[in-house]
Amino acid sequence: MPLAPSAHVDTFARDNLPPQDQWPPLVFDLPELKYPERLNCGVELLDRTAAAHGADRRCLLTPDGSVWTYGDLLARANQVASYLVTEVGLVPGNRVLLRAPNNPWLVACWFGVLKMGGVVVTTMPLLRSGELRTIHEIARIDHSIVDHRFVADLVEAGIGPYTVFGDGRRASLETRAEIQPDRFPGVETSQDDVALLAFTSGTTGRPKATMHFHRDVLANADTFSAHVLRPTPEDLFTGSPPLGFTFGLGGLVVFPLRAGAATLLVEKGTPDLLLAALAQHRPTILFTAPTAYRAMLAAPDRAALGSLRRCVSAGEPLPLTTWQAFHEATGLRIIDGIGSTEMLHIFISAADDDIRPGATGKPVPGYEACVLDDDGNPVPDGEIGRLAVRGPTGCRYLADQRQREYVRHGWNLTGDTYLRDADGYFWYQARNDDMIISGGINIAGPEVEMALLGHADVLECAVVGAPDPARTMSVHAFVVLKPGVPGSPEKAEELREYARSVIAPYKVPRVVELVDALPRTSTGKVQRFVLRDRVAPAP
């Protein structure tokens, strides 16, 4: 499919798209996915929503009581766009790195960059100088906008020039933007101009830059959000994922603004702070990870959860024990989902009565999925294989040979092992590289993890395969105990025996290693490759 003429003056992004014969086929079967050729998702999400729902409608809230209306956000985004063009000298297609916790000015900057035709590179606040340097090497950042509390690592990485906000100085972004006009028409970008460079979390090594068009940003709102989440303008969203994580970007910016709703932005989304924000502001839709849902259940006062009508989980597998415990305690049915940075957001999910506890769900309207064998052939229902998906979004890595690994046989291969049942529900088994083959038998690490999580003393755990000359691999479990539970060899053996009572003997961990914490990426995903390195023998 030929690309529409680009509005980018700086053609770096389009020049570094993978060849189109390496793209997955894109599917636009739903009528709402037919977008106009000239499309700026910033204008569509902000300008048009403000016009449709009213500039005085609340849009962004913070725990300290600050409220920005749609008109406030629009004015500041326009001022940021004007500042970047008139003072910084940026042109459409330039890459702008954003580095800040979740707060209103970060959102204003995100929209400002999009409206001036730039390409947004939103990063995690937890990233350090070496990781930022890698992002700069790949994306060739032209300018950065950074919260004053997160400048040091940017400077150490040698990334410049940059503009700081939040320190109240005369040279700050707020002061410099204040003198700019609060109207900016928005560059008429192509629907398939690159809008975002989103970096994978690096669970397997060097991160990859995924390239998303203006139409892609809207497509996730018009599929998962519109058909599964189904928000209303009266909803108040909140959650823990940073906006540099596409799970957070969709759930805290794109989905609420597409619906004319509002968002409570929490800079630190730890379970205790989330609960405090829920108690004070009464949000109705929550986006967070399974570990946070488990932690909130352990809080002495769960009344703060009473305002919620929707809870969304993604980023890591949702254990059935967590789903059941949360449902029993609150009456809420957590909406599980699988997405990927390559696909931008969730593509398999289910809500309400369509939820089958333990299953991820069915393909979101607009997407299709199947389970393939190693040769790219569909496997029968009930058999495990590689999850394959396609729809209106798809993998496009920036100048990365790994494109050929993710897109094969006309599908996006997510790296997950699944089975589909006879009713069309998809059941997660493991990441492809997390399957443990012991004595010729496949063991799904997450199944063992879910068994251990059923023990009252276990806070979290991760299971990997350890080299074993007799069995090829054996099951090795890393377990974090709940606060106040003492660790000991006897406790480790108790957990092994507990696992033996709930799963087949051949799946029981040969070793249960008690640890203080699991290694995680900046998005909170467990770095299992670090754990595999720990159990592998030294070369």
Image (cartoon, rainbow, N blue to C red):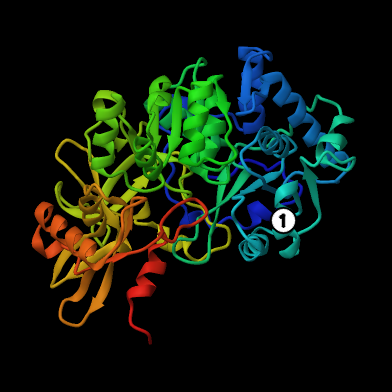
At a point 52% along the width and 66% down the height, the residue shown is 206
At a point 65% along the width and 52% down the height, the residue shown is 13
Badge 1: residue crowd in 10 Å (few <14, some 14–19, many ≥20): some
Closest to the observer, 18 or 93? 93
Closest to the observer, 306 or 349? 306
* Residue most extreme to the bottom: 539
Image coords of residue 521 (percent x, y): 49, 57
**What residue does disc 1 label?**
141
Q: Is residue 377 left or right of residue 213?
A: left
Q: Would you say residue 34 is visible in this rendering?
A: no
Please identify the quarter of the rendering in which residue 475 is found. bottom left
Q: Is residue 399 left or right of residue 26?
A: right
502, above or below 295, in the image: below
Image coords of residue 268 (percent x, y): 56, 41
Quadrant for the C terminus, please.
Answer: bottom left
- Amino acid identity at mark 1: Ile
- Disc 1 is placed on an element classified as loop
Q: Would you say residue 182 is visible in this rendering?
A: yes
Image coords of residue 217 (percent x, y): 55, 36
Please identify the quarter of the rendering in which residue 141 is found. bottom right
Image coords of residue 292 (percent x, y): 41, 41
